[in-house]
Amino acid sequence: MKNISLDITKAAMFLEQGAVKAYETKVKEAQEALENGTCPGNDFLGWLHLPSSVTPEFIDEIQAVADTLREKCEVVVVAGIGGSYLGARAVIEALGNSFAWLVNDKKNPTIMFAGNNIGEDYLAELTDYLKDKKFGVINISKSGTTTETALTFRLLKKQCETQRGKEEAKDVIVAVTDACKGAARAAADKEGYKTFVIPDNVGGRFSVLTPVGLLPIACAGFDIKQLVAGAAAMEVACGKDVAFEENPAAIYAAVRNGLYARAGKKIEIMVNYQPKLHFMSEWWKQLYGESEGKDGKGIFPASCDFTTDLHSMGQWIQEGERTIFETVISVEETNNKLYFPEDEENLDGLNFLAGKRVDEVNKMAELGTRLAHVDGGVPNIRISVPALNEYYIGQLIYFFEIACGISGNILGVNPFNQPGVEAYKKNMFALLDKPGYEADSKAIKERLAKEA
Ligand SMILES: O=P(O)(O)OC[C@H]1O[C@H](O)[C@H](O)[C@@H](O)[C@@H]1O
């Protein structure tokens, strides 16, 4: 089996000679700190050796629950937000048919996602769609108290019980949450739902290889053993004793910190050329955004889907402020082959493409864009993924996680907390008169009255 690989030549050229290598000591220190548990946030390092510690028995346990849901449900709604949502969706979309919900062959349940917004139309339309469906729910929340997920679960639980009866509903509602705390745990214990525990020492955004991601991914019909095996292969390839030059996570962490600190590149755009990877970028944005964006520091993680966004964001990227760099996920071999046909009339003038594969055109678009953007002053990191399958997506996941841990330590932040996320929640609860927020409610209302 090959591994995913990294090409930084078109990024390192924006730094002075030896600048990437100059990070070797810092990278080593970060790796040691992670390994020895001496870095900030060291009570959240459970992800570090997670892939190699997932046992076949545990995979079987998750698979058995997934199989029950697969057997009893036409639709499985995955309720969760942030780290309790994005990883599962990223993997399911990367591996699935682009039109999964339309071509449903009844072999797999349709997977839907909710609890990740407070859109009234979204929830009304979802609950309406589910009215005549045999559906189940995976309720995912580490804290068990996240508003978006909790309010969605309340709606779905009631609807599931009404449609299937309380007894049957018990078989198709699963909770993935804290071992003891939170509303999701309380409901699960009271109702007798099957539950999986999110380990205390694995933060939400690092939790995709726990049941948070594995259960929905298995429900969708994908091979979670292979996903974990891929991640475990990267755990080896990115291990702390692998030489700096040979370690893709070390190099990625070094070059992005170099671009940020030494070349003024404050924004990293994660780029794909396969629309299926859209949610991999969304997952990556939370991973890096919450891990690094603090203490007035951090690369802003952005994303584009190419070639789509070349027709909207391409102008900015080519000629806008030179504060960006790109990290491209390049898929070497697609899963399908589609050839352009010859056309006698050639009205569209595309006969020069006849006999070529669609992916050949895509690859030339990728190469042409790389050259153009590099010429335009945009450093380019390329991550080559041999194919879109469970094994390589597992590799990609662990690669980004370990590189993030290293990178955040180089930056000098605690990569494993997210204190800033609480500010909006406090205001929202105060505005909604949540019990316990009385003083905040009074203060915020007075403030709004003054500002009016
Ligand atoms: O899993 P939960 O506790 O529901 O949290 C879901 C998400 O919401 C929070 O506000 C955090 O910023 C995220 O890091 C987290 O992944």
Image: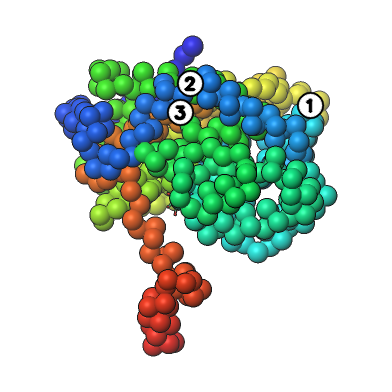
Quick check: can you spot residue 411? no
Q: Where is residue 68 in the image (x, y as percent from the top left)?
A: 70, 32
Q: Residues within 10 Å of mark 3 (few under 14, many from 20)?
A: many
The residue lying at 24 percent from left, 42 percent from top is: 40
Going by the image, does 270 lie left or right of 348?
A: left
- For the point 47% across and 39% down, the residue is 198
Mark 3 or mark 2, which is nearer the start of the sequence?
2
Q: Quadrant of residue 327?
A: top left
Q: Position of residue 11 (x, y in %)?
A: 32, 33
Q: Position of residue 320 (x, y in %)?
A: 39, 52
Nearer the observer: mark 1 or 3; the answer is 3
Label 1 sits on residue: 343
- Determine which residue is flagged by label 2: 55
* Residue drawn at the location 59% of the way across and 59% of the way down: 151
Q: Name the residue type under label 3.
A: Leu
Is 431 positioned to the left or the right of 7 in the image?
Answer: right
* Residue position marked by numbered label 3 in the rendering: 396
- Looking at the rendered structure, the secondary structure element under dot 2 is loop
**Upstream in sequence: badge 1 or badge 3:** 1
SS of the residue at dot 3? helix
| Residue located farthest toward the top when viewing the structure as drawn | 1
Disc 1/disc 3 C-alpha distance (Å): 40 Å
Is label 1 in a helix, a strand or a loop? loop
Give the CA separation, mark 1 to mark 2: 55 Å
Foreground tag (1 vs 2): 2
The residue that appears at 54% across and 42% down in the rendered structure is 176
**Is ligand 1 closer than 8 angstroms to the Cβ of mark 3?**
no
Viewer can see residue 428? yes
